[in-house]
Amino acid sequence: MPYSVLPIFVDLTLQNPADKSRLAMASALLDEQFAPCILVPNSDAQKFILHGICEDHLETIIAEIRHGLSIPLQAGAPQVAYRETITFCTQLDYIFMHSSGSTAQFVQLNLQFEPMDWSNGFLFKNTANSITDEHAAAIAEGFEHAKECGTVSGFPCIGIQIALQHYNCSAELPASVIVSAAKAAFVEGFSKAKPVILQPIMLVCVGVPLKYKESIVRDLAQGSCKVRNIVESEKNDLVKAIIINASIPLAEMRGFTTWLTTNTGGAWPLRHTTHILCSNT
């Protein structure tokens, strides 16, 4: 599973830089044991980024690294993995000017930006004639760099297809200039294609005693939670219960289990899956 669809992450800092290779070698084992998760090394010698599905999931993996693998580390606060995407098709005819001494150089890119399923990440299609493999690779590299920074709030971009329909440039143009041109074209095209921010939405299923139905549903409705349905059930012969199915933004899930338990005398069981949906936040 790509990290782009995992909803939460945490920064890890190793206390001993020599442990970086050990943790990198253990990443496949962690993914097999705690999937879905992914451990991404940072350029810093002592840092990793751990992606997972919820805070409890991350805490379990971190505990395994510390105690099971005997690798001491510090963990930052969990962060919600927001993403950016586009909602509109747009054409862009972009000309990038570059001066090299007294010589003016240019790159012309005719691009089509199109939204696609966010789970597909990013796709670059080259349909232009008369472009070398080297220049096409430089354009792809520029797009790859640009999509990691977004244009709305600096979050990575997903769910985008870009087609290069026409290409022209000055003779003997360095690859670095083409990379810069692709970055600038991505920013302009993405901005024109009605970008939005995506946030993880948790689909929650929880049981609570029937007598707390009104207060719990009322409190949930005061936030961004959307109650999808409520089903009456029985926990046992003595306790009448309801099962609440709701969608809650992950950013509002911090302390949710504690709040629910405190206000119901012990809710059960809490299950959730993750979807990343469009949001105006």
Image: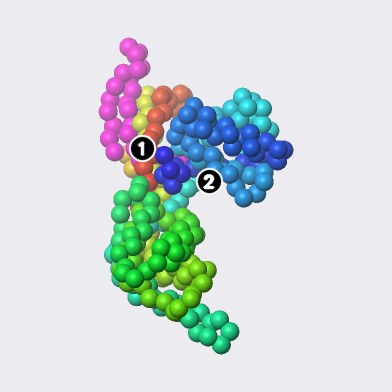
Left or right relative to 172: residue 239: left
- Badge 2 crowding class, 10 Å Cα cut-off, few under 14, some 14 to 19, many 20 or more, is some
- For badge 1, the amino acid type reads Leu
Q: Residue at position x 44%, y 64% from top?
A: 134
User: Is there CB contact under 8 Å for labels 2 and 1?
Assistant: no
Secondary structure under tag 1 reads: strand
Instruction: Quadrant for residue 195, please give it.
Output: bottom left
Instruction: Quadrant for residue 72, please give it.
Output: top right
Which mark is nearer the camera, 2 or 1?
2
Numbered-mark total: 2
Q: Is 158 placed above or below 200 here? A: below
Q: Residue at position x 41%, y 63% from top?
A: 133
Q: Residue at position x 42%, y 77% from top?
A: 169
Please tell me whether residue 201 belongs to the stretch shown in magenta.
no
Q: Which mark is residue 168?
A: none
Give how far apart the Cα atoms at labels 2 and 1 are: 19 Å
Secondary structure under tag 2 reads: strand
Residue situated in front as seen by the camera: 88 or 113: 113
Q: Quadrant of the N terminus?
A: top left
Specify whether residue 227 is in view: yes
Specify whether residue 279 is in view: no
Q: Residue at position x 32%, y 68% from top?
A: 128
Query: Which range of residues does the magenta coloring cover?
Result: 228-257
- For badge 2, the amino acid type reads Gln
Q: Earlier in the sequence, mark 2 or mark 1?
A: 2
Residue 80, image x, y percentages: 49, 46
- Badge 1 crowding class, 10 Å Cα cut-off, few under 14, some 14 to 19, many 20 or more, is many
Residue at the spot of label 2: 79
Residue at the spot of label 1: 203
Q: How is the image coloured?
A: rainbow
Residue 49, image x, y percentages: 56, 43
Q: Name the outermost residue toward the top.
A: 237
